[in-house]
Image: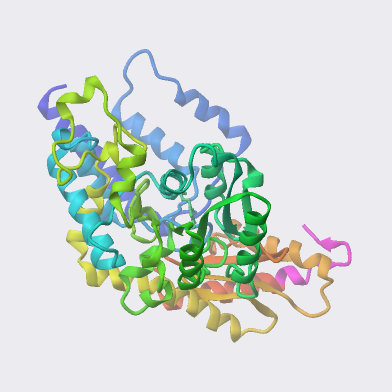
Amino acid sequence: MSERSFTELAQKVLDHCVLERQNIPSQPIVKVIPREKEKDIGNIARPPQLPASIDTTLSNAETIFGYRVRMDHPKFFGFIPSPASDLSWLGEVLNSAYNTHAGSWFQSSGPSAVEKHFLSWLTRDIIRYPETAGGCFVSGGSMANLSALMLARDQKLSLEERSKAVAYTSSQTHSSLAKGLGILGFHPAQIRKVACDDSMRIDTTLLRSAIEEDKAAGKVPFLIVGNAGTTNTGTVDPFTELAAIAREQSLWLHADGAYGASALLCQARRAVLNGVELCDSISWDAHKWLFQTYGCGMVLVRHRKFLTESFGTTAEYTQDAAETAESLPNFWNYGPELTRPARAMKLWFSFQLLGLDAIDKAINRGFELAEKAQSSLQCLKDWEIMSPAQMGIICFRFHPPHVPAASLDDLNMKISQTAIEKNLAAPLTTRIRGVLVLRICSIHPDLSDEEMVAVINGLDQLAHLLLSRVSKDGIAE
Ligand SMILES: Cc1ncc(COP(=O)(O)O)c(C=O)c1O
């Protein structure tokens, strides 16, 4: 391709992307491909025999990507949204242009030095881990959790003990922990899901007795997982107490901070995570509340040498890139991947251009917006707060008198679905203590207070409209 035509092509692609990003707030939040249209995508999925034009290809890209949930829409409140900043996207563009293999120091000494120093800043200055700490960038929370679980297994269990080992999570722990334990060869019966107290925190009395019971039965407790922000309700487990139990029993303590650990970068809120620095390992996703594009996560550990003990490898064919000093790390020895992108670089790029004050403010906004949603709901009749605003998450439901309990779940599900259909907002649903609730995770910093109030008032109007259609047989279509 000639230099000129590549420049023109790149310009077109960039212009297309910039426009797309600028248009996010005015676009449908949720758009799933209708069954009859799926075939059309099949037709454009196949590679053509002869090259297509850039205009046709970009237009097809627009069609294809049109069918998605805009996880970065300010009114997408489901799961954990991805309020990716434009700067992260630009950092990704830069990163993929340089296309660094960030596995070894030899191949990537510049970006690896950034990764090392960035992780050192995060672990020592922000988490307040000791000098021995370190970490590794991975694709996201699931991989960070898996990596930490592997360290727990390798540091706490002999080969013979593995079949008798028991891990303790709460009933609210993210599914990626059970998946990770499964990948590592543990059987589901080796995971004890300890019940939570009234505020959805792990019940430490039950935890203590479960550990004693298992030990008496000849089992080998080895790991406690604490939640630094549960996905359901944003609840933080009592880390200081969990750390005391882990210390007494000589267990590994892992914090799943996939989304919640970001509160550590917000001066006004970081105290909610007190005690997290006592954990042996922490997962932290930058593609959640650090405003990065997918996939960007970190596993952070109190002792970085445990990472190399579990993940360090050598082979003849990598001898030219062998690690020559601990201070010049080969990150392929710190995590599961050999070939890996320089994920730290987009975080570095956006943090450089934003500055820590703006990041602190943007994280605080997530807290404030959930609190705003709560105070607006409290001004309305017939709404029940099922889990108060914490860590940018609030769960609630419409609960007018005289509606039969059996219809409440359907009614609230319908409120969520109708809000999405009307593009009012996308609060999805979850279950708390068996009850269906609406859930808002409000970590997109671009939403204003007024917009949040308008969303809550809009939900209220919808709810009353739907209520008028509730009969004893359910909600009329
Ligand atoms: C608390 C928690 N842990 C782990 C994960 C998994 O992270 P990822 O989807 O990046 O693999 C999530 C995802 O939402 C989460 O909320």
Residue sitting at 38 percent across and 73 percent down?
365
| Residue 240 placement (x, y as % from top left) | 45, 72
Viewer-side residue, 336 vs 261: 336
Extent of the magenta region: 465-477
Residue 203 drawn above or below residue 375: above
Residue at point 34% right, 50% down?
293
As drawn, 356 above or below 339: below
Q: How many labels sit on residues?
A: 0
Is residue 228 shown to the viewer in this render?
no
Q: Residue furthest right?
A: 472
The residue most toward the top is 49
Q: Residue at x 41, y 33 (%)?
A: 60
Residue 28 vs 462, above or below: the answer is above
Does 379 sit left or right of 250 as displayed?
Answer: right
Q: Can residue 329 be seen by looking at this rendering?
A: yes
The picture quadrant where one finds residue 257 is bottom left
Residue 436 x, y percent position in the rendering: 70, 63
Answer left or right for 70 relative to 404: left
Question: Does the magenta portion include 468?
Answer: yes
Tell me where residue 432 sits by quadrant: bottom right
